[in-house]
Amino acid sequence: MKTSGYSFKDLEVYKVAREYRKKIYQLIKKLPTEEKHNLQSQMRRAALSVTNNIAEGHGRFHYLETLQFLRQSRGSLEELIDDLNACHDEKYIGEAEIEKLKDESYELLKKLNSYGAYLRKRKNESSQERY
């Protein structure tokens, strides 16, 4: 189904976050069954929160609201980085796989920061146009 106009799905940061979420979901499947209701569940919620907050923020009409949802997305991403540390500490996943995902986490964090900076710039420009 095609959407009319500009959608959150068109945002580069959303596309990258969505691919990252898919990788986290694949990693979750490798966790031991005793983590099903703990770490696995926590990681699933945090990974989904990253993309959900980008989407919800895009749907807001005010820059400040959008930025708040981006901050929430960032917080969920930082939470996932710590969850990856837990996976490493418990030796659930190999170090190389963890490091690759952490590198992708930091790249996504940069994209979230860049999108936030873009929105702040747009907000400042629109504020100056009124005067």
Image (cartoon, rainbow, N blue to C red):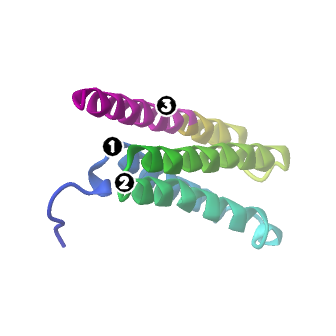
Report helix, strand or loop for mark 2. Answer: helix
- The residue located at (40%, 32%) in the rendering is 120
Magenta stretch secondary structure, dominant: helix
Q: Which residue is mark 1?
A: 12
Q: Which residue is mark 3?
A: 110
Q: Which residue is mark 2?
A: 58
Residue 81 position in % (x across, y down): 68, 43
Q: CA distance from mark 3 to mark 1?
A: 12 Å
Q: Where is residue 128, by image quadrant?
A: top left
Q: Are marks 3 and 1 in contact (CB under 8 Å)?
A: no
Q: Residues within 10 Å of mark 1 (few under 14, many from 20)?
A: few
Report helix, strand or loop for mark 1. Answer: helix
Q: Is residue 95 magenta?
A: no
- The residue located at (36%, 59%) in the rendering is 59
Residue 57 position in % (x across, y down): 43, 54
Magenta span of residues: 106-131
Along the horizontal axis of the image, is 19 left or right of 42?
A: left
Q: Are marks 1 and 2 in contact (CB under 8 Å)?
A: no
Q: Where is residue 41, by image quadrant?
A: bottom right
